[in-house]
Image (spheres, grey):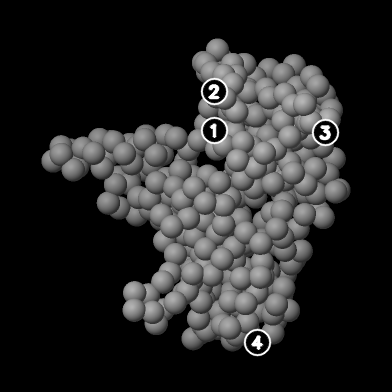
Amino acid sequence: MNHSAQHLAVVGATGAVGIEILKCLEQRDYPVGQLTLLASARSAGKKLSFRGEEIEIQELTPDSFAGVDVALFSAGGGISKTFAPHAVEAGAVVVDNSSAFRMDEAVPLIVPEINPDDAASHQGIIANPNCTTIVTLMALNPMHEAFGGVTKILASSYQAVSGSGAHGIAELEEQVEALAQGKPCPAGSVYPKQIAFNVIPQVDVFLENGYTKEEMKMHFEGQKILHAPDLKASVTCVRVPVFRSHAVAVTAAFANQPSVEAARAAIDAAPGVQVVDEPFAESPAFPTPLDCTNGDDCLVGRIREDLVLENALTFWVVGDQVRKGAALNAVQIAEIL
């Protein structure tokens, strides 16, 4: 056994993100000495495979974290708020995928390619940003650094149903199947309207200012991750009938005059993100959600000068919501630790 091998716990192990976390740990050869899989009572006793072994899922309790070095939480904000303090008390570092602690001043909010040094100030909990924020900032940060800092963001997201977990994926599947067979569309429980062959301009609950919680996340989380307290973001988040990867159309204004060429060069030089942008090729190249599904990198295309705002570029970015938007980012944070 690797002498630096860690005792890792995964909370919410049976969810879409929990299962992806196990894949990422395997693929990245993370030094796992012991693995504890935790979920609700109804999943306890089931088994998940990890590196060829079957590991039994245990029920999550306040006493689940004895001897755990790192606990990766992806079971929703309520669970995180209740159980993360128990994990910290037992001596574990919590990497939390929910929104429970993101805006807490004592909790670092980390995208490892952007602000890894912020992780050093943790007091037991590190937060994983919102998936749409991660995908957007992966493309934006190289430009933020190249052009004197980003000042304004206008964005519209095209968010996959995986953002609602396994239930969202199942709901889209059921509706598409029924409609393809000429049957009436089954009513959904996850989305307020039919998601098959439709788009829904509501992700999360509405706030008093008319924006949704999800839309404001890019504003507040962007300020924190980029260390840009004056950054303003106006976002419309839209759920689309795509299974897995999020896409975002972004216009960003910078302190200095940007250029398309410099933006492409900056993105290409940055880790975890690639330019796919050949508008004048015989078959124009640009990324789509399917192009990055199951991939680690975010893909950026359609980079052009904005025709409305000064010192601004408009671009399109896609990223696998379950991987870079959640599981992979969490595992990368654990790697920093």
Residue that carries the numbered disc 1 in the rendered image: 19
Give the label, 2 or 4, closer to the camera: 2
Q: Secondary structure at mark 2?
A: strand
Rounded to the nearest angstrom, the CA distance separating label 3 from label 1 is 24 Å
Q: Secondary structure at mark 3?
A: loop
Task: Tally the marks.
Answer: 4
Q: Residue furthest front?
A: 1
Marks 3 and 1 close (CB-CB < 8 Å): no
Rounded to the nearest angstrom, the CA distance separating label 4 from label 1 is 43 Å
Left or right, 3 with respect to 192, comes to right
Give the label, 2 or 3, closer to the camera: 3
Q: Is residue 114 visible?
A: yes
Tell me the crowding category of disc 4: few under 14, some 14 to 19, or many 20 or more residues within 10 angstroms, Cα based. few
Marks 4 and 1 close (CB-CB < 8 Å): no
Q: Earlier in the sequence, mark 3 or mark 1?
A: 3
Give the number of the disc on residue 257.
4
Tell me the crowding category of disc 2: few under 14, some 14 to 19, or many 20 or more residues within 10 angstroms, Cα based. some
Q: Quadrant of residue 253?
A: bottom right
Marks 2 and 1 close (CB-CB < 8 Å): yes
Tell me the crowding category of disc 3: few under 14, some 14 to 19, or many 20 or more residues within 10 angstroms, Cα based. few
Q: Is residue 151 visible?
A: no
Q: Earlier in the sequence, mark 2 or mark 4?
A: 2
Q: Earlier in the sequence, mark 4 or mark 1?
A: 1
| 157 or 21, nearer to the observer | 21
Rounded to the nearest angstrom, the CA distance separating label 3 from label 4 is 47 Å
Left or right, 86 with respect to 285, comes to right
Residue type marked 1? Ile
Residue that carries the numbered disc 3 in the rendered image: 4
Residue that carries the numbered disc 2 in the rendered image: 48
Q: Earlier in the sequence, mark 2 or mark 3?
A: 3
Residue type marked 3? Ser
